[in-house]
């Protein structure tokens, strides 16, 4: 890379684009800016949740409404939404069956710590969709992963969880590790961290079966916790045979295999596990599984369930360390039933896959035409434009490919042209409500911005 360039783009050219687009954004949203000045002081650091400041625009836009694959802010800007709540609304904003379910359940009570007839129906739907697991309901995928880890430790009697460098499993402590000089260490930047996380986790590189084998051979790993594809980084696909290798190694060394499909549910009906015939011991999925209602599900095979029940029966009475009072509430089951039965369908996925391929083709053509050293990756309805050559092999590669300065400039420039993508890693999602014309508008906007960045460059 030539001096003065970043991701193949001249820094001076990038600076001009960033400054101009930031001004354009701010000048166009006086109502959002005014509302923030009037009401943000009550919140810590000015936002209800800290990641609302992670967006690269000068300040957050305040949303007035969202429907399908369109979002409108209080300044009246309508944008095509390809972020979709970072997968939470992957099936579109407020799918009609989910809205009907919410309205129907609202008058019958929101939470009462007891099951419903719909809860009984949802169990069968979960098995039909994701596999024959024994299920539990949580509110977030972080909770579901945390509970799965506790079960794995309980049934194996082992302390450590194996995760992959650069992984994302919510805010689970065991995932907050990285590799430094060949050793597992606590990730830098964690707030309030007082324990050495290498005591409870071991970190390997994705696609490195030799490294996994060596870590498991020590005999202290309760479970491998992994996504089928690394997604909350610059996206990394698994090598051929990697998942078969994980399954074989986990079985050989007495560790469980936990598959977190919270993002890779984009792959197709039943997620990556069903599409590719994976065989995990435990399965986790959250975010969009109930159409946007905060919900996660986690399940285990009959074999693991039997081991867990045996351990649970022998423990002393008291807190198990699992469960939250509002989880498995009737509203979650109403929305789960509507989503699993009417929203998460073969037809929906076929539409999403078709338009995702259209998007990949368009973005790739622009990159090729401008000779940008970038590439595009797709996992079903999930598309990511990466500002580096590919393919990427592991978390180390993904970290090096992450270029926030360029990604942020692209994000704001695309938003100013009516297209909202995720605020990190240039991730884009296609929903069942997304239209061809929306995809084409995104491709055209991307072409305009990239053409400016790479104008007359060879």
Image (cartoon, rainbow, N blue to C red):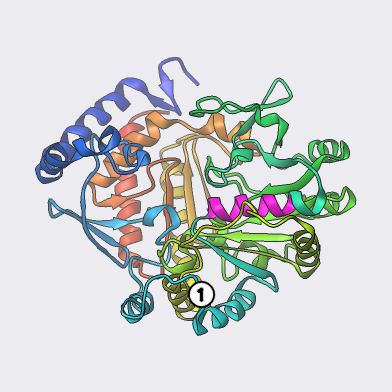
**Quarter of image, res 43:** top left
Q: Does the magenta stretch include residue 27?
A: no
Residue 313 position in % (x across, y down): 77, 63
In depth, the one of 199 and 445 nearer the eye is 199
For image coordinates 79% across by 36% down, the residue present is: 211
Do we see residue 392 in this rendering? no
Q: Is residue 145 magenta?
A: yes
In the image, is 223 to the left or to the right of 33? right
Q: Residues within 10 Å of mark 1 (few under 14, many from 20)?
A: few
**Quarter of image, res 40:** top left
For image coordinates 85% across by 49% down, the residue present is: 249
In the image, is 92 to the left or to the right of 352? left
In the image, is 50 to the left or to the right of 158? left
Do we see residue 144 in this rendering? yes
For image coordinates 12% across by 40% down, the residue present is: 38
Work out which residue is located at the far front of the displayed protein and give it: 317
**Magenta stretch, residue numbers:** 141-152
- The residue at which mark 1 appears reads as 114
Residue 3 position in % (x across, y down): 45, 14
How many discs mark residues in the rendered view?
A: 1
Residue 127 position in % (x across, y down): 64, 75
Q: From what the image shows, is residue 270 above or below residue 165?
A: below
Quarter the C terminus occupies? top left
Residue 70 position in % (x across, y down): 27, 62
**Quarter of image, res 147:** bottom right
State the SS at label 1. loop
Looking at the magenta stretch, what is its main secondary structure?
Answer: helix
In the image, is 333 to the left or to the right of 278? left
In depth, the one of 278 and 118 nearer the eye is 118
Q: From what the image shows, is residue 30 above or below residue 349?
A: above
């Amino acid at each position: 890379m030539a001096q003065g360039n970043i991701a193949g783009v001249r820094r001076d050219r990038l600076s001009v684009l960033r400054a101009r687009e930031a001004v354009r954004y701010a000048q166009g949203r006086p109502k959002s800016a005014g509302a923030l000045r009037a009401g943000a002081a009550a919140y810590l650091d000015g936002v209800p949740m800290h990641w609302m400041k992670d967006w690269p625009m000068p300040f957050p836009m305040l949303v007035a409404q969202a429907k399908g694959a369109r979002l409108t802010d209080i300044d009246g800007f309508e944008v095509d939404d390809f972020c979709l709540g970072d997968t939470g609304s992957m099936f579109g904003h407020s799918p009609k069956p989910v809205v009907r379910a919410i309205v129907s359940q609202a008058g019958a009570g929101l939470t009462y710590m007891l099951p419903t007839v719909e809860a009984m129906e949802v169990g069968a739907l979960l098995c039909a969709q994701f596999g024959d697991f024994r299920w539990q309901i949580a509110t977030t995928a972080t909770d579901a992963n945390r509970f799965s880890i506790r079960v794995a430790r309980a049934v194996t009697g082992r302390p450590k969880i194996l995760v992959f460098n650069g992984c994302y499993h919510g805010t689970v402590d065991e995932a907050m590790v990285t590799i430094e000089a060949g050793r597992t260490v606590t990730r830098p930047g964690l707030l309030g961290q007082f324990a050495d996380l290498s005591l409870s986790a071991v970190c390997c590189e994705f696609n490195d079966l030799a490294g996994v084998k060596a870590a498991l051979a020590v005999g202290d790993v309760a479970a491998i916790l992994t996504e089928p594809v690394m997604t909350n980084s610059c996206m990394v696909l698994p090598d051929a045979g990697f998942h078969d290798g994980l399954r074989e190694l986990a079985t050989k060394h007495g560790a469980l295999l936990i598959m977190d499909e919270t993002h890779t549910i984009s792959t197709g009906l039943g997620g990556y596990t069903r599409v590719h015939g994976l065989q995990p011991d435990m399965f986790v999925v959250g975010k969009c599984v109930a159409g946007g209602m905060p919900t996660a599900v986690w399940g285990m095979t009959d074999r693991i369930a039997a081991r867990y029940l045996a351990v649970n029966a022998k423990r002393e009475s008291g807190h198990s360390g699992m469960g939250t009072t509002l989880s498995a509430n009737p509203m979650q089951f109403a929305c789960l039933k509507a989503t699993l039965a009417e929203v998460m369908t073969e037809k929906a996925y076929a539409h999403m896959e078709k338009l995702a391929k259209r998007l990949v083709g368009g973005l790739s053509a622009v990159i090729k035409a401008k000779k940008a050293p970038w590439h595009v990756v797709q996992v079903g309805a999930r598309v990511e434009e990466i500002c580096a050559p590919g393919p990427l092999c592991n978390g180390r590669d993904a970290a090096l490919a992450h270029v926030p300065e360029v990604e942020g400039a692209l994000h704001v420039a695309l938003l100013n042209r009516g297209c909202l993508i995720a605020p990190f890693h240039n991730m884009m999602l296609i929903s069942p409500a997304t239209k061809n014309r929306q995809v084409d508008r995104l491709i055209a906007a991307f072409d305009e911005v990239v053409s400016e960045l790479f104008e007359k460059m060879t």
